[in-house]
Amino acid sequence: MSRRKRACPPVGELLLALPSAKFELTIRVEERADGAFTGWAEFDESLIDPVFIEGLLAVYEDVLRTATPEAPASLPRAPRGAREHQLRRVFADVLKVASVAPDDDFFLRGGHSLVLVEVAVRIRREMGQDLGLRELYQHPTVAAIAARLERAGALR
């Protein structure tokens, strides 16, 4: 079994190729001395798609940030590609703000359910992919939506 580790929150593309995984999937979160957290996913690539792990860690990170909003945030990470860049533009346009970071929560930036419909319409029109409102509610950050769209594209 091959194994990869992924740091969460993702500050860069820290993927380590290691010789074997002890289990199919292991997720570990450690609190650092500064009060922030570091998370790791160790998984068997022959069984689990790395894109799925990206999405899983993004959602897990959102949960941790929601549960501990006072914890120091890590350095913001750069968008991973054109999909995130396009989603950041859609979020910023819809929210009428100058910019949106990949890990900014749509609702904490001022979004609400009616505006979320516009996000869904723009994703369908501009990116050619459908996401239901439930999925957008469950994944309220650009990073999480990008990971979800990548998973959906990989399944086609």
Image: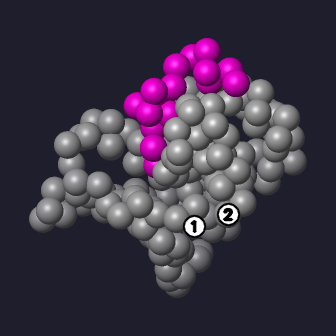
The numbered mark, 1 or 2, whose residue comes first in the sequence reads: 1
Crowd class of label 2 (few under 14; some 14 to 19; many from 20; radius 10 Å): few
> Relative to 135, is 150 above or below?
below
Q: Residue shown at 56%/33% (left/top)?
A: 96
Residue 71: x %, y % from top left? 21, 48
| Left or right: 36, with 42 as reference point | left
- Quarter of the picture holding the N terminus: bottom right
Whether residue 21 is in magenta: the answer is: no
Q: Main secondary structure of the magenta part?
A: loop
Crowd class of label 1 (few under 14; some 14 to 19; many from 20; radius 10 Å): many
Q: Amino acid at mark 2?
A: Gly
Q: Nearer the viewer, residue 107 or 32?
A: 107
Residue on which disc 1 sits: 44
Q: Residue shown at 61%/48% (left/top)?
A: 88
Query: What label does residue 81 carry, if any?
Result: 2
CA gap between label 1 and label 2 equals 25 Å
Q: Which marked residue is nearer to the observer: mark 1 or mark 2?
A: 2
- Boundaries of the magenta span: 103-118
Residue 78: x %, y % from top left? 52, 65
Q: Amino acid at mark 1?
A: Asp
| Left or right: 93, with 21 as reference point | right
Secondary structure of the residue carrying tag 2 is loop
Residue 14: x %, y % from top left? 48, 75
| Left or right: 86, with 101 as reference point | right
> Relative to 120, is 82 above or below?
below
Query: What label does residue 123 carry, if any?
Result: none
Whether residue 116 is in magenta: the answer is: yes
Q: Residue shown at 65%/46% (left/top)?
A: 89
Residue at far left of view: 33
Q: Nearer the viewer, residue 152 or 21?
A: 152
